């Protein structure tokens, strides 16, 4: 299922990161990351635990801002706009860059209210409009048929896989352009994982997806591009097929062939 | 063998002390219920005291304590909740926050008579509220503020961080996140903790002695600037100030029983609220 893509046809860059350093207090977690993430593609971030891939992901919607004493240097451009510029509206940024977390985090509200949460905080209050958004978002995440009769039941009654797809639907409801996924399937069984992967395949048409994964097969299955992180550095970035079959760096090869990690 | 008997002695001692606590509580309750029940009557609950408390009822004191408790919670709850919100959601971890926390803990350990003197100085005299419901409620509010802050922070901490992150990641502002996705799940816990704190305030004598309570009032207060009678103070007066101790003893026990029942009732409300909401929010 590895896709063959002609790199030259994918010229448009969505996220352009240059010379990014990141610090937790005095501990440096990311070193000089430079990467151009292509638009409307799935980019997988792989690497052993603690290599900085999740930290990197969270710099893209400035989620690290909420952790005290963190510092970020370098440039991240999304659609050519510097997201760490002082004039950047973080609220607007996070609306455009949606995020799905490792552990599904449905709010202890009804399914409907979970999806409507985002649109409501962005000022949509008309019931008919909200219903439309909820329905479309659930449809996109493949959950509509499973839950359409119990939209007003608690989201916590859903299964783990359904909860994660609900979180994806919730992210889609605010109409993002980029979706960040932090190991979205790591807590799910194979069946539910497959559904998430199918969903990612569906969504690639309309969104730029960046997914952190521990699972090499998953990266190979779902992604067009793969970035290998090791000890806070970006070791290799390229088309998934190439990274997995003909890696340029010895380190990458050792990792993708399972020699360490 | 020796080791085993030593073990047994320690075990027995611990069991004995535990039972001793129950015994003490049981003795207090039985003593008060036994002697107080005889004094309870419709007249006792609905009439004003007569013959300086030797006859009649304690109605004004019941109402006075209710006023004080209500006033206290109205003042202390918003203040305490706001402080807790600031401390746990906004304040950066550092020397200032540590100092504030230390101050709160210290405040919780200040003897209640000191609060009474403070209330007398600040609310009664300096702010010129006089001996009044307002001054008393403010003083009691200071007294239970630490309890409310600590239990409110506790309630905020039980809301998982992932709910805050989920909300922020959708583009919610910090206040939107707190207002829509943190407070709804923590307010029940905050209220429960606060009511338990108020239960303690209801029984306090020293803080109201100097700020709110009157020895005897022929009529009920008309405004928050009027003094009130209150159950704990009434009890204190009956027990220590009346010339004929034997004659007022039944009234004393009756007052103590009513106060006990009232505090029990307040705590029961808190427990019911907690049970109700614990079923609603799980994650």
Image: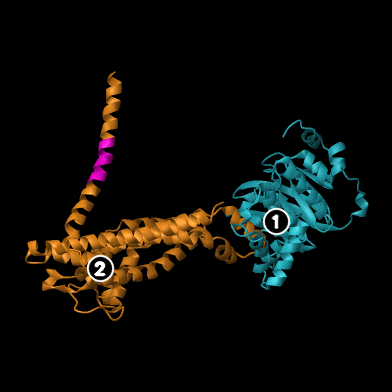
Per the image, label 2 sits on a secondary structure element best described as helix
In this rendering, the answer to whether B43 lies above or below A96 is below
Give the prevailing secondary structure in the magenta stretch. helix
Q: Mark 1 and mark 2: span between their CA atoms?
A: 58 Å
In this rendering, the answer to whether B18 lies above or below B1 is below
The picture quadrant where one finds residue B256 is: bottom left
- Of all chains in the rendering, the one displayed in cyan is A
Stretch of the chain drawn in magenta: B15-23
Whether tag 1 and tag 2 are in contact, CB under 8 A, the answer is no
Please state which of residues A226 and A179 is positioned toward the viewer in this rendering.
A179
Tell me residue B192's x, y (percent). Answer: 42, 59
User: Is B17 included in the stretch rendered in magenta?
Assistant: yes
B7 vs A28, left or right, is: left
Is disc 1 surrounded by few (<14), some (14 to 19) or many (20+) residues within 10 Å? some
Closer to the eye: label 1 or 2: 1
Tell me residue A57's x, y (percent). Answer: 71, 51
Q: Which chain does tag 1 point to? A: A
Q: Which chain does tag 2 point to? A: B
The picture quadrant where one finds residue A1 is: top right
Q: Report which residue position mark 2 lands on.
A: B208
Q: Report which residue position mark 1 lands on.
A: A147
The colour scheme applied to this rendered structure is by chain
At horizontal 74% and vertical 57% (from top left) the residue drawn is A144
């Amino acid at each position: 299922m590895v896709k063959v893509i002609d790199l030259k046809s994918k010229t448009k860059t969505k996220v352009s990161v240059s010379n990014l350093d990141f610090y937790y207090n005095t501990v440096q977690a990311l070193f000089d990351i430079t990467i151009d993430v292509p638009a409307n593609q799935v980019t997988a971030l792989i690497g052993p635990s603690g290599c900085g891939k999740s930290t990197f992901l969270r710099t893209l919607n400035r989620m690290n801002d909420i952790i005290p004493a963190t510092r970020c240097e370098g440039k991240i451009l999304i659609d050519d706009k510097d997201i760490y510029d002082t004039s950047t509206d973080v609220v607007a940024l996070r609306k455009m860059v949606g995020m799905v977390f490792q552990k599904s985090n449905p709010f202890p509200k009804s399914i409907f209210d979970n999806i409507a949460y985002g649109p409501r905080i962005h000022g949509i209050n008309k019931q008919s409009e909200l219903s439309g958004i909820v329905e479309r978002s659930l449809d996109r995440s493949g959950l509509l048929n499973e839950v359409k009769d119990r939209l007003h039941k608690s989201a916590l009654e859903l299964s783990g896989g359904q909860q994660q797809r609900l979180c994806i639907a919730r992210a889609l409801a605010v109409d993002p352009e980029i979706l960040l996924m932090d190991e979205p399937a790591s807590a799910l069984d194979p069946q539910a994982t497959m559904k998430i992967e199918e969903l990612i395949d569906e969504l690639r048409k309309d969104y730029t997806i960046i997914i952190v994964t521990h699972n090499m097969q998953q990266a190979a299955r779902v992604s067009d591009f793969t970035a290998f992180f090791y000890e806070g550095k970006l070791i290799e970035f390229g088309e998934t097929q190439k990274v997995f079959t003909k890696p340029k760096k010895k380190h990458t090869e050792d990792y993708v062939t399972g020699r360490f990690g | 063998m020796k080791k085993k008997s030593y073990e047994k002695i320690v075990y027995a001692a611990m069991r004995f002390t535990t039972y001793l606590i129950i015994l003490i509580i049981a003795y207090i309750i039985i003593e008060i219920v036994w002697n107080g029940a005889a004094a309870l009557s419709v007249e006792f609950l609905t009439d004003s005291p007569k013959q300086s408390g030797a006859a009649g009822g304690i109605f004004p004191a019941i109402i006075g304590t209710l006023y004080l408790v209500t006033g206290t919670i109205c003042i202390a709850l918003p203040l305490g909740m706001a402080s807790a919100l600031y401390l746990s959601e906004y304040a950066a971890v550092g020397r200032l926050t540590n100092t504030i926390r230390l101050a709160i803990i210290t405040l919780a350990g200040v003897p209640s008579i000191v609060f009474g003197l403070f209330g007398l100085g600040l609310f009664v005299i300096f702010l010129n509220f006089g001996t009044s419901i307002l001054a008393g409620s403010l003083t009691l509010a200071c007294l239970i503020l630490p309890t409310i802050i600590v239990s409110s922070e506790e309630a905020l901490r039980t809301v998982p961080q992932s709910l805050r992150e989920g909300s922020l990641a959708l583009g919610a502002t910090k206040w939107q996140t707190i207002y829509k996705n943190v407070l709804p799940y923590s307010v029940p816990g905050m209220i429960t903790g606060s009511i338990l704190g108020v239960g303690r305030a209801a029984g306090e004598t020293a803080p109201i002695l100097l700020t709110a309570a009157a020895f005897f009032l022929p009529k009920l207060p008309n405004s928050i600037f009027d003094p009130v009678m209150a159950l704990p103070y009434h009890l204190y007066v009956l027990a220590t100030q009346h010339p004929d101790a034997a004659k007022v003893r039944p009234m004393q026990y009756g007052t103590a029983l009513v106060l006990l029942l009232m505090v029990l009732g307040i705590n029961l409300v808190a427990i019911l609220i907690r049970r109700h909401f614990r079923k609603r929010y799980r994650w």
